[in-house]
Amino acid sequence: MSSTLSALAELRAEVEQFYATHFHLLDSGAAEEWALTFTEDGAFHPPSGADPVRGRAALTAGVGAGYQRLLEAGEVHRHWHGMVAVEAAGDGTVRAKCYALILATPVGGTARVHLTCVCEDVLVRDGEKLLVAERRVTRDDLP
Amino acid sequence: MSSTLSALAELRAEVEQFYATHFHLLDSGAAEEWALTFTEDGAFHPPSGADPVRGRAALTAGVGAGYQRLLEAGEVHRHWHGMVAVEAAGDGTVRAKCYALILATPVGGTARVHLTCVCEDVLVRDGEKLLVAERRVTRDDLP
Amino acid sequence: MSSTLSALAELRAEVEQFYATHFHLLDSGAAEEWALTFTEDGAFHPPSGADPVRGRAALTAGVGAGYQRLLEAGEVHRHWHGMVAVEAAGDGTVRAKCYALILATPVGGTARVHLTCVCEDVLVRDGEKLLVAERRVTRDDLP
């Protein structure tokens, strides 16, 4: 069909594949590999409104500590992105807005919905890869 | 690869991008903009079996009132479509069958699964856009 | 764009469309049609660690019995695959790793998260179709 639709199909595929790998890393505790899916000075703006976590070392530390707490609590978290809308911005970046769903399962227990969020990413290209430059997350349970 | 797969990739991308935007509008209370993603005489056949809601004015009114009730109840709803199967029908329309998941989060409270449904859409093209001509939803909790 | 991205878009579209149809069949109790989406000697390695269910007759029987139990219990299950990462392996197979979410709704009752899992599939081509050759599922609630 049109080159516009072909470009949309390719961009969506790239972003969806990126998110899949990104969250497989996060949820399996591969904190350092996960942080490598951000740019070197990539920033996560947390839903709490606290200062952004910036840079791979800080991202690795934050996510590693969170995973350690889950291990100690005997709980598995799974992050899902859905309803992903992508846009190739004029400046060469890719903007993605989506819903995030975090599911929690205690080992030996019953799965539950932990949180629903909205996530807005600025993604940039590094050679053939996408990387997160900026991530802003809002939690639906916070006013 | 084959032109069939290329067409499938483009059609799926178009429908998935459409659903993402469509539900971002719905869940943020942009009732009128949401209704513009239906055809002028587009119809929503509700799971209750009641008469269809037909036309953008009626769709706007129904969804606007629903959003107002959620605001008053202090609750955020998120609509997810998943397991989307698309088909280009011979008559130029696009048929989509998917699962719908509605997640609900009270402000200050705990997220939960509100409903799971099956959604069947007839989508039509208006220039470069897709629009919903007919939507049929069944709720899994209703016999 | 590049032929790599074009191939990724096509492969992802094929796999996502396959999963949609595959689970519409499963969740509607079309056990025999569902089993036909496996190869003739396709195997499902269950999360329990029990012996794999191998071949279409065994798959049909297992899934048919499960659906019968749900009917008797008055409960609807919906299987969602998400965060799907696909890879065209060198041997002509397609590897897919994804999250699986099973939602359960009692008729007249309230929907809930039943299980979250990780699913790893080896998919093979049969003419224009994909088929599951091997499926390995792990449940997040089992140690």
Image (spheres, coloured by chain):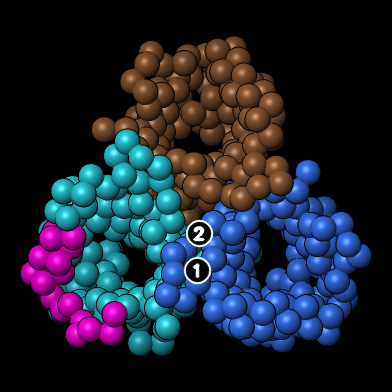
Chain colours: A blue, B brown, C cyan
How crowded is the residue under tag 2: few (<14 C-alpha within 10 Å), some, or many (20+)? Answer: many
Give the residue displayed 54% in from the left and 45% down from the top.
Answer: B103
| Type of amino acid at the residue the image marks with label 2 | Arg
The subunit letter for the residue under badge 1 reads A
Residue under mark 2: which chain is it in?
A
In this orientation, which residue lies closer to the viewer: B81 or C6? B81
Q: Is residue C87 left or right of residue B78?
A: left
> At which x and y percent is residue A47?
79, 57
In the image, residue C16 above or below residue C24: below
> Which residue lies under the disc numbered 1?
A105
Q: Earlier in the sequence, mark 1 or mark 2?
A: 1
Q: Secondary structure at mark 1?
A: strand
Quarter residue A48 falls in? bottom right
Label 1 sits on what residue type? Thr
Q: Which residues are magenta?
A: C48-66
Q: x, y percentage for residue B140?
A: 34, 39
